[in-house]
Amino acid sequence: MTLSKKLGFGCMRLPLTDKNDDSSINQELFNRMVDIFMEKGFDYFDTSYAYHKGQSETAIRKALVERYPRKSYRICDKMPTWALTSPSDNDKFVNEMLERLGIDYFDVFFIHNINIPWLELAEKAETFEYVKKMKENGIAHKIGISFHDNSKLLEKVLEKYGEILDIVQLELNYLDWEDPDIEAHKCYDLCSEYNLDVYVMEPLKGGVIVNPPSKIKEEFEKFNPEKSIASFALRFCASLDNVKMVLSGMNTMDDLIDNCNTFTDFEKITGEEIEFLEKMADELKSNLAVPCSECGYCNDTCPQRIPIQEYFSLYNRSKNQPESNIYRNYFDKMCDEKVSAYECTNCKDCLDYCTQHIEIPDELKKVCKHFKEGFTAYRTD
């Protein structure tokens, strides 16, 4: 695969008509984005049973499957590991995904979000054996896992299942590359050791990398005003030899064009640029209150249904712009209209599912303390 073909369209964060309704995909805009993506020579689309409350697959069918020849594009989908209760669920979900997409095979199929609790569910449901048969029967051309944990667990998984897998999809970006919790570098090396292709998710860490404090933006502008912050992050990932695909969750036309341009005239990352990114990573980490990638997996396991990632996003933006009171108003409004951050019971059900290994209850307490002065609706002493 050429470097220019390494860009994949991540369909977890599609454009919306209502920012408060994740299922309200802007189909017309998505169709136009797909057309440009395809016209520029890219053909890989990544989705999941769960994305956009189950509407991502349907949107892809409308934008892609119903409008383009089957062999002109590739689709990756993922087994909803958290919903598996028995081996019979494998067939049920795969058939539903094929129907939603309107296709009869997957180009790539993953067991979704392997971590400690969901690995147990996948093994009890015999899902690894099931996806192996999917490949043998032509239902999936390539199979793998998307992985959200540390290198110790990945090594355990690869020792057991590495021979049947083709791909591991990793969270990988220059911010997490040497992070002791994420261990992106170690996980990448393990995949290389097992001769498995690496597909990259979260190259922008859910937008954290491209929405830094103004000081860091100015540093990028001084270093190279011709390149976007996103382009540096994408090139860092795509320049790794064993990385075969880099996903980007594009929800604006500007993002799509910028990313396509980055890969159309691809330039490998240089040593000087890597040194600069290492410096920027240190600065960004020092300014980041909570290293949340806004994946939302914690929300699905929270008994209170607290929109955890939304509170962390407000907290990060508020800490980066201390002169602004607008985020305090947003916090007040969110607690009034949604479940209050103060409703956290410290049950810690979310901890095993956090892809960033954040101590979520402790951080929510900090969020509440930070906003408390201007907060009235649910204030507690």
Image (spheres, grey):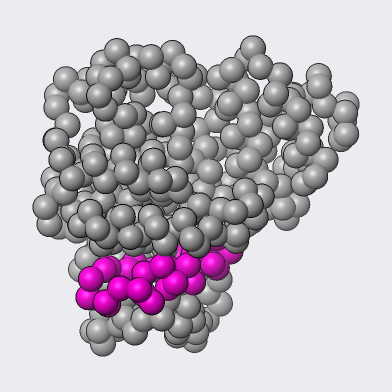
- Seen in the picture, residue 173 relative to 96 is either above or below; the reply is above
Which x, y percent locates residue 93?
A: 48, 79
Q: Determine if the magenta segment contains residue 55.
A: yes
Q: Nearer the viewer, residue 381 or 121?
A: 381
**221 displayed left or right of 308:** left
Q: Determine if the magenta segment contains residue 2.
A: no
Look at the image and give the residue range highlighted in magenta. Answer: 48-77
Q: Nearer the viewer, residue 145 or 337?
A: 337
Residue that appears at 51% across and 48% down: 295
Residue 71 seen in render: yes
Residue 125 seen in render: no
Quadrant (top left/top right/bottom left/bottom right) for the N terminus: bottom left
Residue that appears at 39% across and 40% down: 254
Q: Nearer the viewer, residue 342 or 223?
A: 223
Which x, y percent locates residue 364?
A: 68, 34
Residue 333: quadrant of the picture: top right
What count of labels does the image hold? 0
Residue that appears at 81% across and 22% down: 374
Which x, y percent locates residue 94?
A: 43, 80
- Seen in the picture, residue 252 relative to 85 is either above or below; the reply is above
Which x, y percent locates residue 370?
A: 71, 22
Residue that appears at 71% across and 19% down: 325
Quadrant (top left/top right/bottom left/bottom right) for the C terminus: top right
Residue 318: quadrant of the picture: top right
